[in-house]
Image (cartoon, rainbow, N blue to C red):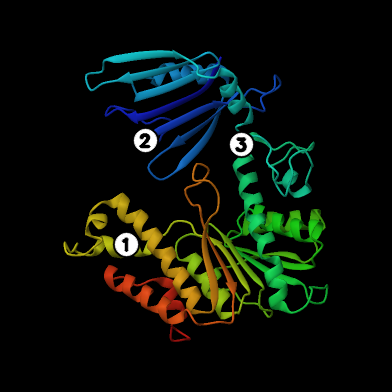
Amino acid sequence: MILSAVFSKPTKTCPEIFGKPYIKVRIWKNPSFSAKKQNEFQAEFFTEKQAFQKNFTAEQAQEFIEKHVGTAFKNCIVKTDTEEITTMANKKGEIKVFRKAAKNSSEEQKFSNNFNRIKNYILQEGNPIPFLVELGVMTKDGKVVAQKYDKFRQINRFIEFINDIIESIEKLNGTSYTQENPLRIVDFGSGKSYLTFAVYYFLTELKKIPVCITGLDLKEDVIKNCDSLAKKLNCKNLEFKVGNIADYSSEKNPDIIITLHACDTATDFALDYAVKHNAKAILSVPCCQHEINSQLEKQKIKSESPFASIERFGILRERFAAIATDAIRAELLEQCGYAVQLLEFIDMSHTPKNILIRAIKKHSDNFKQESKIRMKSLLNELGCNQALGKLLSKESEL
């Protein structure tokens, strides 16, 4: 019985699989498989920048392995309950197969059975949660839908970050939140609002904290659906608005600003809004970041630059630009009076967009000068500008 398979080192003639140029594929037996379901195996496909998930029946998994081993990929390791089979192909197309008994077949089976074991999540599987059922993450009996398990993990992980900062926010507020003075949160780029509903549910149902939450997105149809669901679930003080982050305004300042995968400079507009409206906390997971990469791409590479070797190669330049962007954002937030951390949002195997910026408002500004020096040094070396710096500099000298 096959437990798992890993493909690596694509051949030069490797065709696109399911329309993508994958460099690695992992397949494993679904531990929650039952006879009523067709998807006995789960698979993850990796490109240079992204990861995609797919489900297979046992027959489809077997067919995929037989079709691509030694042809699309040079290396393949298949583990069964009794042996480990390694297939290797050389440049001439010659294929060699090595077999050995499984070192500990019971351990392999245990790993397979526990690969996606139920973790001690804040939102527990097995307990039907209305918004998760309505959004298709859970079945009516509380079972997490296999294709939505990554989303389920993301939701829980973000709630953990919310839970970590609540006490600090209340201290900054100076008093407990009430119906007259609720905890105010804005979710910029809320999309289908998995996260917005999750934060609302967690705070109102589990923490019993009065809230007023706004979700903002550009897509009218998406906002309409979210608004309808909020009414259906009787979510008081949860509203959704159509709008651009750059143009958003509200009579009341937010306590917390959250963004999940707001594209490119949309994250900067959200951070800018948070700073200028004195938000007590920011939780932001940036998405694609093109601004600095585009500037680096247009520049003539200077061989004496310490970053010259990185700038030469597109994929390295892109990743470096994303890291530099988040580093600059962190420095700017520190200069504006926030204590900042850059944390892993969720494991890289589930999403490559896995850096979370967590910023909590502080009153000390002892670190401002050092932060300015670090940031200016980096920007000068790169010869670049950055959106958040330009936005904040309109009203204050950093």
Residue at 58% from the left image edge and 58% from the top image edge: 219
Q: Amino acid at mark 1?
A: Ser
Question: Which disc, if any, is residue 235?
Answer: none
Residue occupied by mark 1: 294
Kindly identify the amino acid type of the residue bearing the numbered disc 3.
Answer: Gln
The label number, if any, that marks residue 147 in the structure image: 3
- At x 82% / y 73%, what residue is drawn? 178
Q: Please name the residue that numbered disc 2 is placed on.
A: 21
N-terminal of the pair, mark 1 or mark 2, is 2
Q: Nearer the viewer, residue 310 or 291?
A: 310
Query: Whole-percent x and y of residue 137?
Result: 68, 42
Spatial CA distance of label 1 from label 2 is 24 Å
Q: Residues within 10 Å of mark 3 (few under 14, many from 20)?
A: some
Occupied quadrant, residue 312: bottom left
Residue 110 in picture, x, y percent from top left: 62, 25
* Residue 70 visible in this rendered orientation of the protein: no
**Could you tell me which secondary element the residue under label 3 belongs to?**
helix
- Outermost residue, front direction? 103
Above or below, comparing residue 352 to residue 45 in the picture: below
**Labels 1 and 3: the sequence-earlier one:** 3
Q: CA distance from mark 3 to mark 2?
A: 22 Å
Q: Quadrant of the C terminus?
A: bottom left
The correct choice, above or below, for 42 with respect to 186 in the image is: above
Q: Secondary structure at mark 1?
A: helix
Q: Nearer the viewer, residue 360 or 140?
A: 360
